[in-house]
Amino acid sequence: MPIFEYRCTKCGHVTEFLEKAGARGKHACGQCGSAATKKAFSTFAAHAQQAAPACPNRGSCASESCPMAR
């Protein structure tokens, strides 16, 4: 389930809620308790693994000290 941010129109505080996409529930401000909140536009982050570099010797290194032999 994604995390959505809601901004309070009374005090401006941003509160995060875990909910299904498209949910239309009412949320109270985490700071002042007001029910006057609006969904805020927020960004997301994703983690990606970096690909291992290609071995120039195609993995046929004779030495165990080669960093590509691991």
Image: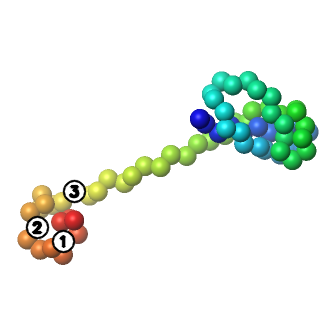
User: Which element type, helix, strand or loop, lies under badge 1?
Assistant: loop
Q: Pick the residue in front: 21 or 43.
A: 21
The picture places residue 66, in percent across and down from the top left corner, at 18, 71
Rounded to the nearest whole Å, what is the CA distance between mark 2 and mark 1? 7 Å
For disc 1, the marked residue is: 66
The picture places residue 10, in percent across and down from the top left corner, at 91, 39
Q: Pick the residue in front: 43 or 36.
A: 36
Sequence-wise first label, 1 or 3: 3
Quadrant of the rendered structure where residue 8 is?
top right
Question: Which amino acid is tagged 2?
Answer: Cys
The picture places residue 48, in percent across and down from the top left corner, at 43, 49
For disc 3, the marked residue is: 54
User: Which element type, helix, strand or loop, lies under badge 2?
Assistant: loop
Circle number at residue 61: 2
Q: Pick the residue in front: 22 or 7.
A: 22
Rounded to the nearest whole Å, what is the CA distance between mark 3 and mark 2? 13 Å
In what quadrant of the picture does the N terminus appear? top right
Quadrant of the rendered structure where residue 34 is?
top right
**Is disc 1 surrounded by few (<14), some (14 to 19) or many (20+) residues within 10 Å?**
few
- Which residue: 80% across, 39% down? 7
